[in-house]
Each structure stands twice: as C-alpha cells, then as structure tokens.
Image: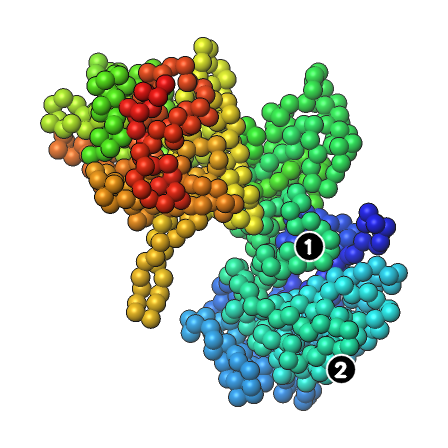
C-alpha cells in the first residue's frame, strides 16, 4: 500500500458502478480513473464490479443509453418483460407492484409523491422513461427480487473494502449508491474507515426504492461521517434530488450535502459525465489527497469523452514527454531509463531529440489504433494530431509511460471572428513622412486562405505580395498551393490580408490600401471553407513558420503573424494563456516573431429579463489565444471617431481570467472595407465587415510598416510591444476595454 509522506496510510477510492453496463471491469475502472484523475491510478482505485452477475441472468445486450445511440418513441415498455429479463420469478407480487409504480413515476405520473420526467421537455420525456425503465428496473429488480442476487452483489463491494485501516473514499453511481448504502449500514465504523461517501445519479430518494431498502431510510450508516450527493438536471434516475431530509446524521456525522450539477453528456445519467463535473472531480481528488493541479494525461474535456461509444472519434493533440523531462506519475530516474532504452532501440548516436520522440510516439500510437486511416495520426513539431475513439484514449491513459505521452489535449475548435481607418492610426501620415510602407517585411496571415489572383495583392508583371500559400487543414505537412490558384470561398482570410497589405489597382477608381501596402504576406489556411478550424491546424502552421525562420539566412523569414481567429477556453483544463496554441505562440514570440491576435467579439451577452431579452456588456470575455501575455491582443473601436464612440460594443474586454490587463490596444474594427474574395469586376473588389478580426490586421500592418523603417527592431518583439503601447493615443475609456488606446504609427517612429 502506498504511503503518504507523513507515514499515514494513503487513502484509496472504491468505485461502485450503476445500471446498464456494457463494459468489463478493467476498462470501466480506467474510464472512471481517467474522468477523475486523468490517468490509470493502479492500486489506489478499485472497482466493485457486479454487472456480470446480472448479465448471467439476462445475457441479452443491454439497451442503449438515452442520448448515446438515440431512442425511438415506441411507447411504454413491457414491465413484465423487463422483470423476466432480470430473472425475477413469475408471480412475484412485490416485484410487479414495484415495476408498475416505477413505470408510472418515470412516465411522469407523480401521484405517489416526488416528481418524474414531466420536468423534461416533451420531446425527450417518453424515450427517457423508456430507457430508464428498461435498464433501471431490470438491473434493480434483479438486485431486489432475484433470490440470492442481493447478497452476491453486496459481497463484490465487501471484497473491495480494505480492513487494515486504510481510509476509503467510496464513489457510487446510480444503483451503486443503493449497494453502498446497504453494505455500509451493515458495517461498524471500526470495520472500515470511510473518509467520504460520494453518490451521484442516486435513486435513494425515490419512495419505491426506499420501500425495499435494508435498513429503511432514516439515518446515515454508522460507518459514514461525511456524505456528498450530486444530482444532475434531467437525470431520470435521481428523481428525488435531496437525500439530507431522509437520511439524518448520527452523532459525530455531518448532514448530507446535496448539490445540483450539470451533466454535459447527452445522457444526463452518464457516470463519466458526472465524474468530469469539476465540483465532483475536485472533491474526489481532494478526498484522495491527490493534487487537483498535478500533471495529468487526459485533459478534463478529453476525459469526459471516455463514456462515448467506441465508434465515435474526435480530434486531440497529444503532447509527448520531451527527452530529459519526466511525465505524470514518474520521477527523473524512470524518465532517464525510458530515454536510454529508446536510444538503444533506435540505434542512433547522440542524445535523443524531440523530433525523434514525436516520431516514435506517433508510430506507437498509429500501431495501437484500430483504424489508422480514420485515426489520422499526424506528427507535428512538438505535438501529434489524431482523431481517436474512447477506447483508444483509454489505452493511452493506461500505457502513457510506455508511449511517452505527457498530456492529451482536445484539439479545440477555432473560428473566424467576424461581426476609413488609416487616418486613425496615423498610418497615412507615416507613409507620407517616413515612407513606412512595409517593404522588406513579411507577415504571416493564418486564416481561411486567400483569393490569390485578387488585384489588391498584385505588383504587376506577374509579381505579387503573396510569397506563399500553405494549406494546413489536411493530414501531413502543410501543402503548398500556387498563389494564382489559391481560393478563399469563405472570404474572411482575403479580407484580413487586404487590411495588412496591398492596394487597389490604379484603374479601379478606389483608394483602398492596407496599413503596410508593400509588405509581403505568407498565407496559411488553418480554417476550412466555413471559417472553422482546429488547434492542430494552427499549430501545424506555427511549426512551419518556426522552420522557415530557423532555415533563413541573415534574419527572420517571417517577422510577424496575424490571428484573426479564436475561441473560448476551459479554465479547469488550461492555465490562462497556456493552451497548446498559446505555448507555440509563446515560443515564436521568444524567437523574435511579433504575434497579433484579435481579442474576440464576445463583449455583449444576451440575457433574458422580465422585460424581454436584452444585451449586457461582459467583462473577462477575452478569448483564446488572445489571453496570451506574449502577444498583442487587439480590441475594436469606431473606424473614424474613436474618441466620440469609444469601444465597439461587440469587442471582448478584460481582465483575463487570471487577472491580467487585456486587450493591449484597440484599432478600427467597425465597417472596415477590404478585399472581396468573390469579386467579379472592379466594382466588387471590396466589401465591408466588422469585428476584432478587422482590428487585429490594422495593428499587424502598422507593425510591418514600423519595422520597414526601424530595421534594428526586427526580431525584438518585447521592445516593439513596449514602444507600441507607450505611444498609443488614450481615448479615455477603461483600461480593460481600451488597453493602452489606439496605436499611433507616427508617434512610434518619432519615439525611436
């Protein structure tokens, strides 16, 4: 038994599962371990598995859970058939009355007290009731009414409870809470040390269940001094959400703490869904003395997919353990042994490199998956992109040491941020006075792509400001696309690029131009034709930029990049500004690349009030990756009169969730005219859009123009950011709304 540092015995968790299981004991335990702790806890957790006993009576496959495979609306189930499947002897009057009463309750008839599924929307009431009756009644009827079954199932839990004084955190779902209650009621406090009983999705408050309990409700088991009970909205099994009024504490015990939570799975009774609720997850970790901020293998939003069917795949980013570092649950000596073994296996001289580790781990994962084509295992520079099933994630969590996996992150969805300006930035004056046009500067635009033959980017005589177009949305290395063949059906990327650089052709009759009209651009398609993308695609582009700069002679090949995209982030998974995309952006910044990011368009939130729906301003709405410190996050202001109209209502505002001031500055983002990817003639070359997506490229172009004049600041992003913010024009708004204010290119150039 593992020991704590103070020599007190380490606690263990004993799990008791609920109804309708389709998994064997070991994978089920791994699912619960993954959901709570993010990796296999080994001997520190145990599963009191009992479904095989029920399955021996009714070998037919259990019905699918509501919301996982979908349920038909086939009307009320045959309760007699459900009892027969549970092995209940024909003519058992108590069983028949129980089944009929539960059928009424679950169908929404609450004449017996409490409430039923009438609280559910009509559309799902009947299929939920059908699923719950067929699975809940069958398994529960087997427990209560099949001769000898109750004792056999209880013995499974008794066998898992330590009798050597090791503290136990008992974690019970659904019918498992019935088993836990009855077993603990038989035991004295001296026989087992229960640090905490944690129940969720429990039917212990249902009258029909209480009639069958031994002993009847009224008091907490003597072996329990602290009991935490959780019920999810719309869970058809935990029909009575409060247990505290029916199970009174004994002397020395605390009252039951009942709490409502949101189970984010489509099946609101899902055990994995409950266990990934931060409140429950953190409670169990705290009771187990496991640091809730300790390194994990599966991020919480990845772990919650463990309960999904194994034919469903979703995108993840796998972060290998860097050579010389140690992964979760191992020490430096163990990591060194793995590194040495890997070097001997590779039969290559010299120290192990990160590139070799990524390649080796990707190979092991590809060999492990059921369908390599569907899994799309794609090694990047520091990560591995893949589309994995719950079963494959379970294997990674179990074998993470051998696979050399540090963490598995969700490849989060990112989207474009859409919702007269050069004078506001003083870019026109700087062009006239300093010839600040962006010459000899190259900027990367990561977006939906570009319309490569748009005349806005043409230099004439088959020359273009577009230095390269790379598609990162497919498996494998970025795919080069000839600029004259590049297309952008969505149009967002073309519009953004046109704000950074380029100018209207002389025969168009337009005076449209970018902030740095002669800056070169390299375009990375990281969003699909609907404006949606994944972290993996963005990281693939960032890797390519890093490689271009490493291979460049005499300075940087790419001086800065623009990200007019973003998305929300989960503070229970990432530190603010430390998502995988943020990690890679930070590396580029520290290698000399300026990073400009739109801060998001979440500044207004629609809420329902007694007077109708209305919008309110929302602080702490900065998206990811704009919450990164090593970047310039840009909000939006009125294009012509920012002093009068101030910050755009849609512009996200700070502070960040960890208390830092963002945005860094603001720029024109309302009604911005720029290149139209769907043009058909000179009259349709340009169109207007609004959003911080339009504000960010203004700053990108301004910085490119600055670097074209003040060459000594190339590759020095910290100093450039300092000059930018020090010379902004204050428009008199709150710091968390306006940042330092509106950039002023003339003042930047004059300051140095």
Based on the displayed image, in which of its 4 quarters is residue 171 positioned?
A: bottom right
| Direction top: furthest residue | 554
Q: Earlier in the sequence, mark 2 or mark 1?
A: 2
Query: Residue 411 at x, y = what percent?
Result: 51, 42
Q: Secondary structure at mark 1?
A: helix
Front position in the image: 263 or 720: 720
Front position in the image: 633 or 389: 633
| Direction right: furthest residue | 164
Depth-wise, is mark 2 or mark 1 nearer the camera?
Answer: 1
Q: Residue drawn 55% across and 43% down?
A: 575
Query: Residue 344 at x, y = what percent?
Result: 75, 23
Q: How is the image coloured?
A: rainbow
Depicted 594 relative to depicted 349: above or below: below
The residue beneath circle 2 is 215
Q: Residue drawn 49% across and 15% down?
A: 551
Based on the displayed image, in which of its 4 quarters is residue 209 positioned?
A: bottom right
How crowded pointer 2 is (Cα within 10 Å; few <14, some 14-19, many 20+) is rated as some
Give the left or right position of residue 644, taking residue 386 as reference.
left
Query: Residue 91 at x, y = what percent?
Result: 68, 88
How crowded pointer 1 is (Cα within 10 Å; few <14, some 14-19, many 20+) is rated as some
Q: Which mark is residue 285?
A: 1
Give the left or right position of residue 125, taking residue 158 as reference.
left
Image quadrant containing the C terminus? top left
Query: Residue 38 at x, y = what percent?
Result: 65, 48
Residue 34 visible in the displayed image: yes
Depicted 554 relative to depicted 597: above or below: above
């Amino acid at each position: 038994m593992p020991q704590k540092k103070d020599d007190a015995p380490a606690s263990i968790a004993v799990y008791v599962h609920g109804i309708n299981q389709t998994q064997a004991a070991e994978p089920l335990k791994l699912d619960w371990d993954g959901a709570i702790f993010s990796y296999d806890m080994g001997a520190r957790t145990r599963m009191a598995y009992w479904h095989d006993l029920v399955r021996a009576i009714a070998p037919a496959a259990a019905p699918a859970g509501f919301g996982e495979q979908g349920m038909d609306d086939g009307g009320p189930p045959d309760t007699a058939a459900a009892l027969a499947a549970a092995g209940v002897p024909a003519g058992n009057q108590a069983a028949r009355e129980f089944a009929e009463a539960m059928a009424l309750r679950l169908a929404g008839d609450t004449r017996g007290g409490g409430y039923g599924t009438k609280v559910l929307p009509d559309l799902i009431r009947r299929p939920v009731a059908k699923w719950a009756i067929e699975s809940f009644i069958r398994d529960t009827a087997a427990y209560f009414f099949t001769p000898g079954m109750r004792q056999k199932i209880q013995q499974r839990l008794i066998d898992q409870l330590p009798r050597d004084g090791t503290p136990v955190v008992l974690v019970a779902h659904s019918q498992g809470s019935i088993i836990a209650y009855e077993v603990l009621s038989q035991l004295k406090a001296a026989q087992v040390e229960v640090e905490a009983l944690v129940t969720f999705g429990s039917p212990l408050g249902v009258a029909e269940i209480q009639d069958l309990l031994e002993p009847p409700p009224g008091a907490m088991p003597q072996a329990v001094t602290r009991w935490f009970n959780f019920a999810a909205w719309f869970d058809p099994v935990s029909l009575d959400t409060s247990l505290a009024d029916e199970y009174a504490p004994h002397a020395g015990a605390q009252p039951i703490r009942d709490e409502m939570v949101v189970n984010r799975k489509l099946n609101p009774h899902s055990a994995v869904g409950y266990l990934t609720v931060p409140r429950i997850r953190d409670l169990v970790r705290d009771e187990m003395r496991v640091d809730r901020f300790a390194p994990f293998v599966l991020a919480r939003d990845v772990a919650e997919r463990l309960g999904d069917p194994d034919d469903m795949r979703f995108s993840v980013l796998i972060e290998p353990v860097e050579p010389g570092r140690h992964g979760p649950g191992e020490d430096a000596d163990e990591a060194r042994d793995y590194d040495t073994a890997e070097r001997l296996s590779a039969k290559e001289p010299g120290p192990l490199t990160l590139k070799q580790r990524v390649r080796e781990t990707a190979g092991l994962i590809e060999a492990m998956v059921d369908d390599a084509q569907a899994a799309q295992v794609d090694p990047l520079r520091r990560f591995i992109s893949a589309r994995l099933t719950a079963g494959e994630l379970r294997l990674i969590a179990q074998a993470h040491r051998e696979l050399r996996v540090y963490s598995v992150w969700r490849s989060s969805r990112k989207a474009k941020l859409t919702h007269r300006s050069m004078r506001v930035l003083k870019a026109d004056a700087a062009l006239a006075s300093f010839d600040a046009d962006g010459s000899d500067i190259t900027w990367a635009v990561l977006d939906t792509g570009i319309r490569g033959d748009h005349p806005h980017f043409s230099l004439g005589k088959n020359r273009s400001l577009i230095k390269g177009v790379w598609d990162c949305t497919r498996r494998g290395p970025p795919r080069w696309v000839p600029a004259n063949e590049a297309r952008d059906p969505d149009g967002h990327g073309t519009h953004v690029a046109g704000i950074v650089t380029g100018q209207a052709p002389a025969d168009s009759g337009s005076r449209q131009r970018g902030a740095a009209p002669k800056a070169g651009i390299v375009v990375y398609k990281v969003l699909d034709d609907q404006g949606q993308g994944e972290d993996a695609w963005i990281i693939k582009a960032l890797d390519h930029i890093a490689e271009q700069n490493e291979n460049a002679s005499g300075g940087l090949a790419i001086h800065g990049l623009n990200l007019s995209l973003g998305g929300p982030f989960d503070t229970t998974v990432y530190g603010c500004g430390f998502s995988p995309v943020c990690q890679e952006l930070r590396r580029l910044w520290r290698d000399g690349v300026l990073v400009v990011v739109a801060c998001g368009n979440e500044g207004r939130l629609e809420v329902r009030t007694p007077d109708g729906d209305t919008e309110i301003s929302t602080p702490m709405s900065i998206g990811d990756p704009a919450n990164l410190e090593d970047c310039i996050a840009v909000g939006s202001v009125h294009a012509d009169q920012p002093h009068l109209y101030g910050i755009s209502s849609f512009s996200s505002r700070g502070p960040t969730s960890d208390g830092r001031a963002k945005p860094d500055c603001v720029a024109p983002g309302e009604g911005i005219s720029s290149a139209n990817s769907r043009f058909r003639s000179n009259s349709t070359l340009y169109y207007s859009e609004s959003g911080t997506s339009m504000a960010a490229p203004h700053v990108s172009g301004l910085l490119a123009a600055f670097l074209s004049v003040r060459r000594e600041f190339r590759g020095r992003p910290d100093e450039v950011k300092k000059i930018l913010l020090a010379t902004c024009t204050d428009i008199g708004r709150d710091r968390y709304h306006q940042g330092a204010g509106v950039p002023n290119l003339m003042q930047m150039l004059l300051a140095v």
